[in-house]
DNA sequence: CGCCAGGGTCTCG
DNA sequence: CGAGACCATGGC
């Protein structure tokens, strides 16, 4: 079971496109992939079924995930809204790089920057109009002005510097997979443009660490409103430390459901 | 126009 | 640890 729209529009990934109603196209790594949901089942119109199943984490037991959610009104409303949303297994570099560009940007802008970077630096995927997310070495060799032309602003320098560390092997994202959550977060936070929030996004969306709990402005707002007593410190770090444990081993799932629900209902209220 | 957006970094207590 | 300044850009 999967809710494809929620999975691809919830702000964990930024390049999938709905070509016609219910038909989604994008890249898994360097492979063109076309999908739709037919009778509740994920149908691979084009692409490799095994890699699709892995990318979309069809092995995650959502019933077990939901059973671990706190059974309060806020969480249940988010679950009702997002049911079937899956936390993807994105390529680590693509995920990390994208969230380096995400700081103080709206989801729509992150998407624009992702497409601009692909268009300018990515390798063409044969038989499609797509370009893959650029490899670290390609961005390491880009000029800051070229990156700024993709709308990155002050984030350009950070993306380039981190790309250089990854390309040189100084930062070994593949080797870091063996680290435990805390050590991996610490390693990621040594990279330019990567603080605790971006590192947690990489942990959750790119390294399969489902307990990682990114706290952004939206989550902080939700936490203060629904899960916080007045008087307690409500800095992002305090919120993460006090609440991640409450949401259990799949706290990242709970976080994403709360984030998506809040953002969608707020947008609708605004018109 | 002011405000805000999936923040990070540096400085100063 | 925490608060504040600063960093660019775009949509509303």
Image (tube, coloured by chain):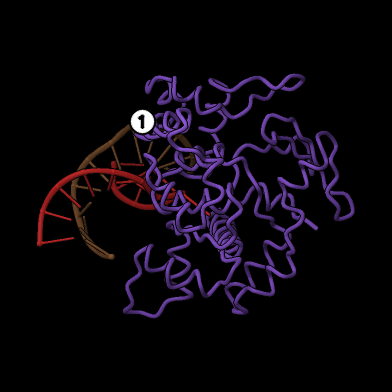
Chain colours: A purple, B red, C brown
**Is residue A109 visible in this depiction of the protein?**
no
**The one of A249 and A88 positioned closer to us in this rendering:** A249
Q: Quadrant of residue A191?
A: top left
Q: Name the residue at 60% across, 77% down.
A: A70
Q: Position of residue B2 (x, y in %)?
A: 29, 48
**The one of A86 and A104 positioned closer to us in this rendering:** A86
Q: Is residue A124 left or right of residue A266?
A: right
* Chain ID, mark 1: A
Q: Position of residue A30 (x, y in %)?
A: 68, 29
Q: Position of residue A14 (x, y in %)?
A: 59, 40
Above or below residue C5? Residue A67 is below
The N terminus of chain A sits in image quarter? bottom right
Mark 1, residues whose alpha carbon is within 10 Å: few (<14), some, or many (≥20)? some
Q: Name the residue at 57% across, 41% down.
A: A92
Q: Is residue A207 left or right of residue A143?
A: right
**In the rendered image, which residue does mark 1 sit on?**
A157
Q: Is residue A65 left or right of residue A72?
A: right
Above or below residue A192? Residue A182 is below
């Amino acid at each position: 079971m999967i809710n494809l729209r929620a999975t691809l529009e919830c702000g964990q990934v930024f390049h999938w496109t709905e070509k016609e109603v219910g038909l989604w196209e994008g890249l898994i790594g360097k492979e063109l992939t076309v999908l739709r949901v037919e009778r509740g089942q994920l149908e691979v119109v084009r692409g490799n079924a095994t890699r699709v199943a892995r990318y979309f984490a069809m092995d995650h037991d959502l019933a077990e995930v939901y059973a671990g959610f706190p059974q309060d009104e806020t969480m249940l409303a988010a679950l009702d809204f997002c049911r079937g949303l899956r936390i993807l297994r994105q390529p680590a570099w693509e995920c990390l790089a994208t969230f380096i560009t995400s700081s103080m940007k709206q989801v729509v802008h992150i998407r624009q920057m992702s497409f601009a970077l692909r268009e300018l630096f990515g390798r063409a995927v044969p038989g499609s109009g797509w370009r893959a997310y650029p490899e670290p070495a390609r961005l390491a060799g880009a000029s800051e002005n070229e990156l700024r032309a993709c709308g990155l602003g002050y984030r350009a320098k950070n993306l380039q510097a981190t790309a250089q560390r990854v390309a040189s092997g100084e930062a070994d994202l593949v080797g870091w997979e063996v680290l435990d959550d805390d050590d991996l977060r610490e390693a990621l936070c040594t990279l330019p443009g990567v603080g605790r929030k971006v590192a947690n996004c990489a942990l959750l969306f790119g390294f399969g660490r489902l307990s990682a709990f990114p706290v952004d402005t939206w989550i902080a707002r939700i936490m203060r409103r629904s899960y916080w007593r007045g008087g307690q410190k409500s800095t992002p770090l305090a919120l993460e430390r006090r609440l991640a444990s409450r949401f259990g081993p799949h706290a990242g799932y709970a976080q994403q459901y709360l984030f998506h629900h809040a953002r969608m209902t707020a947008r609708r209220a605004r018109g």
